[in-house]
Image (spheres, rainbow, N blue to C red):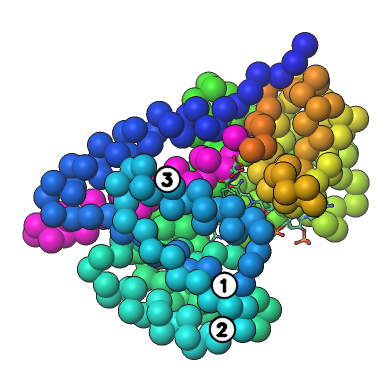
Amino acid sequence: MSARMLDGRALSKEIRAGLFERSLRIRNKGVVPGLAVILVGNDPASKVYVRNKSKACDECGVMSKIFSFPGTVSEYELMELIAELNVSNEIDGILVQLPLPGHVNVRNIIGCISVNKDVDGFHLYNVGGLVVGGTIFPPCTPYGVQLLLEAAKIEVASKNVVIVGASNIVGKPMALMLLQKGATVSICHIKTRDLSLYTRMADILIVAAGKPGLITADMVKNDVVVIDVGINKMSDGSITGDVDFDSVKHIASWITPVPGGVGPMTVTMLIENTIRSAELRMSINQL
Ligand SMILES: NC(=O)C1=CN([C@@H]2O[C@H](COP(=O)(O)OP(=O)(O)OC[C@H]3O[C@@H](n4cnc5c(N)ncnc54)[C@H](OP(=O)(O)O)[C@@H]3O)[C@@H](O)[C@H]2O)C=CC1
Ligand SMILES: Nc1nc(=O)c2c([nH]1)NC[C@@H]1CN(c3ccc(C(=O)N[C@@H](CCC(=O)O)C(=O)O)cc3)C=[N+]21
Ligand SMILES: [Mg+2]
């Protein structure tokens, strides 16, 4: 037996058709949804993301602007740009690509983004919203994973969900979201003593470590649902996840491919958040 695919590309295509309609409706009233992306240095996963975002924005009728800086840019220069974007009438969403170079304090930078334009959902205010169970801007990757599970009618309530990776952008918000949905959640990270003890317990295993081949067939139980968030650029230029797909697919009941799984969903949810932000701007203009 081979696992069924959680096809993020196909689901994204459906969702994006609806997003195009939503953006058309507000553009007809004179509001063009706009996204600003700030890219510093040259992280390979960020480059993939940026490329796919501009394509998807075009597809959905969202205006996008990319601001690229060398890795030597100062915190001050970034803050200055964010301050401008915060008050710009053309911008509904501001996204600062992570990671940032070591000399730039991520918290300071994210803290400058207007809460109403924080389409990544990384500002402390929006993170707090997620903790207490609801936010206007759910973080894109966990939100996309949740929709993939829902589309396949995979119930999360009462399930053992194990998340490998505890970052602020994937692991932690993912855990909060599924906890809210009634899952029993474990979060593993680099200091976890026996990773496979946890992964073998998982009904749903979500992997976001950035380590190709981290999860092998011997580490999962029969019929597990596997969500591979990892985006690793290999030396031959190809992209691979954190899960040994070819062996794990024989044991899992569902699995996401990489590429074509979580990645396209992240992009789609970013566009959704941007359009929702523009819809809010429009309704405020009409007051
Ligand atoms: N598909 C998509 O849409 C997206 C994909 N990504 C990709 O997902 C991956 C993770 O991204 P991100 O969360 O930003 O990464 P980070 O590097 O910020 O976090 C990785 C997490 O995994 C943990 N970890 C690393 N190695 C191991 C290991 N061997 N065993 C257990 N835990 C481990 C780290 O622990 P510690 O912190 O303690 O070191 C950390 O908690 C990357 O490949 C990234 O490119 C990211 C965002 C969106
Ligand atoms: N502030 C911030 N928010 C992020 O959400 C964020 C970030 N910084 N920094 C980088 C990581 C990485 N990330 C990806 C999203 C989509 C794809 C994606 O589109 N993947 C396609 C790749 C297809 C291809 O082009 O080959 C897929 O998996 O099918 C990749 C990577 C978001 N991240
Ligand atoms: Mg993917």
255 relative to 243, above or below: above
Q: Residue at x 66, y 59 (%)?
A: 44
Q: Quadrant of the C terminus?
A: bottom left
Respond yes or no on whether mark 1 lies under 8 Å from ligand 2. Answer: no
The residue shown at (62%, 47%) is 175
| Residue type marked 3 | Ala
In space, the residues marked 3 and 2 are separated at their CA atoms by 28 Å
- The range drawn in magenta is 260-287
Cβ–Cβ below 8 Å for labels 3 and 2?
A: no
Tell me, yes or no, if residue 80 can be seen here.
yes
Indicate yes or no: mark 3 CB to ligand 2 under 8 Å.
Answer: no
Give the residue pinned by disc 1: 40
Q: Please check the rendered image and state whether residue 279 is part of the magenta-colored stretch, yes or no.
A: yes
Q: SS class of the residue under badge 1?
A: strand
Measured along the vertical axis of the image, is residue 99 above or below residue 120?
Answer: below
User: Please, what is the three-letter code of the amino acid marked with disc 1?
Assistant: Val
Give the residue at x 70% y 31%.
Answer: 226
Residue at image x 90%, y 30%? 218
Name the quadrant containing residue 190.
Answer: bottom right
Q: Quadrant of ligand 1?
A: bottom right
**Disc 3 designates what residue?**
56
